Image: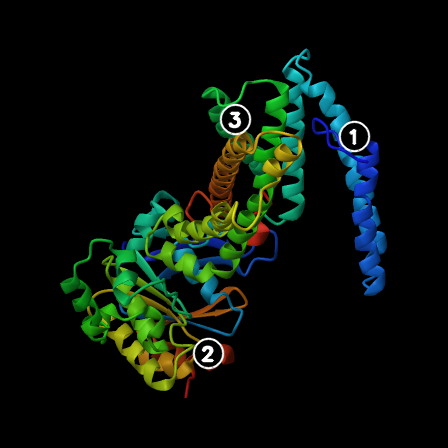
Amino acid sequence: MSSADAFELVGVDAGPVDGDPILRSIDLVLPANGVTVLAGPSGAGKSTLLRLLNRLDDPVAGEVRWRGRALTDWSPTELRRQVAMVFQRPPLFAGTVCDNLRVALPDVDLERAGHVLEHVGLGADLLEHDADTLSGGEAQRMCVARALLTDPAVLLADEPTAALDRAARATVEDLGRMLADSGVAVIWVSHDTDQLRRLADHVIVLADGAVRAVGHLDELDASTDPLVRQSVGAP
Amino acid sequence: MIAVEQGDIGIAGLAASGILVAVAVGISLWRQLGLERSLLWASLRALVQLLIVGWVLQFVVDPDDPIIYSVLWIVAMVGFAAYTTSRRAADVPKVLPLSLVAYTASAIVVLGVLFGFGIYDLEGRTLVPLAGMVIGNSLAATVLVSRQLLIAATEQRGVIEGRLALGLSATEAFRPHLRQALRTALVPQIESTKAVGIVFLPGAMVGLILAGVDPADAVKVQVSVMYLVLGSVATTTAVMSLGISRELFTPAQQLRRPAQRTDD
């Protein structure tokens, strides 16, 4: 991995402004390719870390850098178009699927809109459907399609399958894998160890607001730390 | 006999109208509503408040007095309206300074049109009551729009951050919620404007007709007052909602959390 392209966290504290920090003194370089899974127990700070990467939140101390530049030096809107995000609960906007896609790219034509839907495994015929009528899995894939319209280099995924059934979960996982293979760096928060083992090229284990382990799955499987072994579902 | 002459019902007339309060109290006793004390207190309080206001207004609207008295009166009304708004929408960030700006802007715009175009003569007798209409009628809508915006920012957080995450600016991400809140505040005003004359006769017109003014002239005044109310409500809510929208987001286009809203 080339660290020039990667996210880098230096001495980062994050959390509520007037409360105890959720993340403490984080020094970390995130891989800039493949699927990186952020794992660890609930409350470890996985989502908090993810939200720092596209500046939905700012750290209370320290600095986050991307491509060698502090995030505060990027225009937030430009950064977010390159570092896209999907959420646990897919946020649907009013109107049709096509209206939803146009929020990301107002002048998208029907051909491109249909193409991006097919890219995420949905039919172009859904374009004129009301977004509210999509199933959970369709809605999440539509949100990925919407995010892809800005041609992002990175996709942040905050437990994107936690609210989905098994079949829908598989389609969204396949989509994450396909995007990573096509060159989009995917950073995926999950507390599902089976999912982690199916998807992860790299794993970062967080616990109690600190980085507990970083590495490939086989490296972490060999860890002697019971919490790391449990977080990656080591056999 | 009680007779209306030149709009004066006299002390006897005022006392006799109190019979209607007695009717309301009687109904409360009869149906065991337990509202007698509230009814009497409200009636008495309204009487005392209006007597005081009427007494002070004598000085303000006297053509011989300088217009600055009227202006001071309006400043006090703006301050009181802003204070009331800040009490009734206490969770809204920077609600007091924002509502001061909103009511002031509305008063300047609306009174500027009414007096700038010579629709009314600029004197205490017209300035104070018209400013009262501007501010009084905007109050409920301003509180409503403030609360609506705060509810949207809290309950629709996921959708708003979904738009931000697509690279939209805070203004763009919040626009649908801003539009909805403004519509919610303005639609009742539009509906009551449409129903006027058919469903109810507005207070200003009733007052003028009772005071002996030709109904045709009363209508003209009433219509100008209705337009004033529409303009005031639209201006106040627009200024207020734009101000609140700015307070809800950081300069880095992040939606603030409730705890963050008060600490800067």
Relative to A71, say whether A222 is above or below. below
Residues indicated by labels 3 and 1 sit on the same polypeptide chain: yes
Cα–Cα span, label 3 and label 2: 67 Å
**What numbered label is drawn on residue B111?**
3
Q: Helix or strand or loop: what does disc 2 sit on?
A: helix
**What numbered label is drawn on residue A231?**
2
Percent position of residue A108, x then y: 19, 57
Kind of residue indicated by mark 2: Ser
Relative to A234, say whether B197 is above or below. above
Percent position of residue A65, x then y: 36, 51
B187 vs B48, left or right, is left
Percent position of residue B258, x then y: 57, 53
Kind of residue indicated by mark 1: Ile
Q: Residue extending furthest left?
A: A111
B196 vs B72, left or right, is left
Q: Residue at x 66, y 22 (%)?
A: B72
**Camera-side mark, 2 or 1:** 1
Q: Chain of mark 1?
A: B
Q: Residue at x 65, y 21 (%)?
A: B70
Q: Nearer the viewer, residue A26 or B155?
A: B155
Q: Nearer the viewer, residue A211 or B159?
A: B159
Relative to B69, say whether B3 is above or below. below
Cα–Cα span, label 2 and label 1: 74 Å
